[in-house]
């Protein structure tokens, strides 16, 4: 009986230790933005030769509801994820995939600003809550 209790205790300790170790690895993963979902609202405005382009309402809304989508409150992009969210999930390029639009289809010589600061990340930019993103094509 004593041996049985020691074996059970060792198994419990191993399971608890491996769970804690796994969680510590996850918490140090720089690619994870959120562990239990998010509801963020970056804004995106697109200009072609100075003329503002309209982003359609309900991008990503349909038979399958994408966690990245628009409503009628444009230029807001809704990022409504449950569970673990990674950088790749909320990149600007991902929005264009959901929209089924090529980011370069608006023209050449694109310039991008995020919150007034120039950025060259373009499709790789990881959107954040409250961001004001402008794409300008000449």
Image (tube, rainbow, N blue to C red):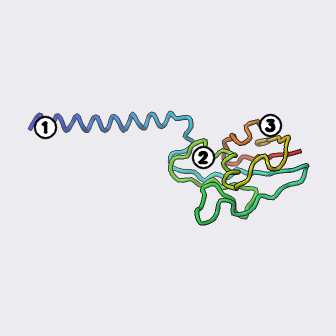
Give the residue pinned by disc 2. Answer: 89
Q: Earlier in the sequence, mark 3 or mark 2?
A: 2
Q: Residue at x 43, y 38 (%)?
A: 23
Rendered location of residue 83, percent (x, y): 50, 50
17 left or right of 100 in image: left
In the depicted view, which residue is nearer to us: 29 or 138?
Answer: 138
Q: Secondary structure at mark 2?
A: helix
Label 1 CA crowd tier, 10 Å (few <14, some 14–19, many 20+): few
Q: Residue at x 79, y 38 (%)?
A: 117
14 left or right of 39 in image: left
Choose top left, top right, bottom left or bottom right for residue 76.
bottom right
Q: Earlier in the sequence, mark 1 or mark 2?
A: 1
- Viewer-nearest of discs 1 and 2: 2
Give the residue pinned by disc 3. Answer: 118
Label 3 CA crowd tier, 10 Å (few <14, some 14–19, many 20+): few
Marks 3/2: CA–CA distance: 22 Å
Q: For the C terminus, which image quadrant? A: top right
Give the residue pinned by disc 1. Answer: 4
Number of residue marks = 3
Q: Residue at x 86, y 54 (%)?
A: 52
Q: Earlier in the sequence, mark 3 or mark 1?
A: 1
Residue lying farthest bottom? 63
């Amino acid at each position: 009986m004593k041996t049985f209790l020691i074996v059970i205790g060792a198994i419990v300790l191993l399971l608890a230790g491996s769970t804690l170790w796994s969680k510590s690895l996850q918490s140090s993963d720089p690619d994870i933005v959120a562990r239990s979902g998010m509801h963020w609202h970056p804004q995106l405005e697109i200009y072609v030769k100075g003329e503002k382009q309209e982003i359609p309402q309900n991008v990503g809304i349909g038979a399958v509801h994408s966690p990245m989508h628009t409503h009628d409150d444009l230029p807001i992009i809704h990022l409504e994820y449950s569970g673990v969210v990674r950088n790749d999930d909320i990149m600007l390029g991902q929005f264009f995939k959901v929209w089924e639009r090529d980011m370069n289809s608006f023209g050449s010589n694109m310039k991008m600003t995020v919150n007034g600061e120039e950025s060259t990340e373009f499709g790789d930019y990881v959107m954040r809550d409250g961001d004001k993103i402008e794409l300008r094509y000449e």
